[in-house]
């Protein structure tokens, strides 16, 4: 998921994913995902298009009010879900790699039956 999101953020600089469903539409562009509502109704479709205009990456949330020719939309940055999922992955990975309770916290040496109060491998107090 993290790799997919990072790839999407980078590639969305040059390519868009656009979708329309009924009154709703959205796109992924410039590192952000936009969602909007419009009066026109269209059947569901989606497409990948080359960016016509280049713009700065969307680093934060934005709301663009509608105009005569354009419908309003809400934009969310994609680095946020990447950061949340990435943090969860890092925490889960660290937790998974933590040695069991009967092992040394510093070096992971198995301390079963150890009565000296010190790890014989690294010398850390238990
Ligand atoms: Zn140790």
Image (tube, helix red, strand yellow):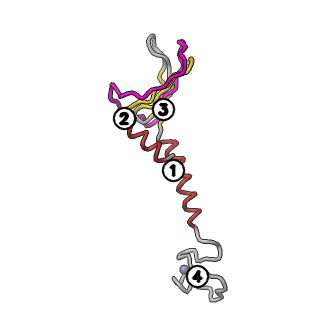
Q: Which residue is mark 2?
A: 13
Q: Is residue 125 left or right of residue 83?
A: right
Magenta: main secondary structure: strand
Q: Which residue is mark 4?
A: 125
Give the residues drawn in magenta, as a range. 33-62
Quadrant of the drawing holding the C terminus: bottom right
- The earlier-in-sequence mark between 3 and 4 is 3
Q: Is residue 117 above or below residue 33?
A: below
Separation (CA) of disc 3 from disc 1: 18 Å
Label 4 or label 1, whichever lies nearer to me, is 1
- The earlier-in-sequence mark between 4 and 1 is 1
* Residue 68 falls in image quadrant: top left
Q: Which residue is mark 3?
A: 33
Residue 61 in the image: x percent, y percent?
A: 49, 33
Mark 1 is surrounded, within 10 Å at the Cα level, by few (under 14), some (14 to 19) or many (20 or more) other residues, namely: some
Separation (CA) of disc 1 from disc 2: 21 Å
Q: Secondary structure at mark 1?
A: helix
Q: Tell me whether the residue at label 1 lies in contact with that at label 2, contact meaning CB atoms closer than 8 angstroms.
A: no
């Amino acid at each position: 998921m993290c790799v997919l999101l990072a790839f999407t953020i980078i590639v969305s600089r040059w390519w868009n994913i656009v979708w329309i469903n009924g009154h709703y539409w959205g796109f992924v562009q410039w590192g952000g995902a936009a969602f909007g509502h419009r009066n026109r109704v269209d059947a569901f479709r989606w497409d990948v298009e080359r960016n016509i205009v280049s713009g700065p990456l969307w680093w934060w949330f934005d709301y663009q009010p509608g105009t005569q020719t354009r419908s309003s939309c809400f934009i969310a940055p994609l680095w946020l879900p990447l950061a949340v999922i990435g943090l969860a992955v890092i925490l889960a990975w660290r937790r998974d790699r933590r040695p069991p309770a009967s092992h040394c916290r510093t070096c992971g040496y198995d301390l079963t039956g150890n009565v000296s109060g010190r790890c014989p491998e690294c010398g850390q107090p238990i």
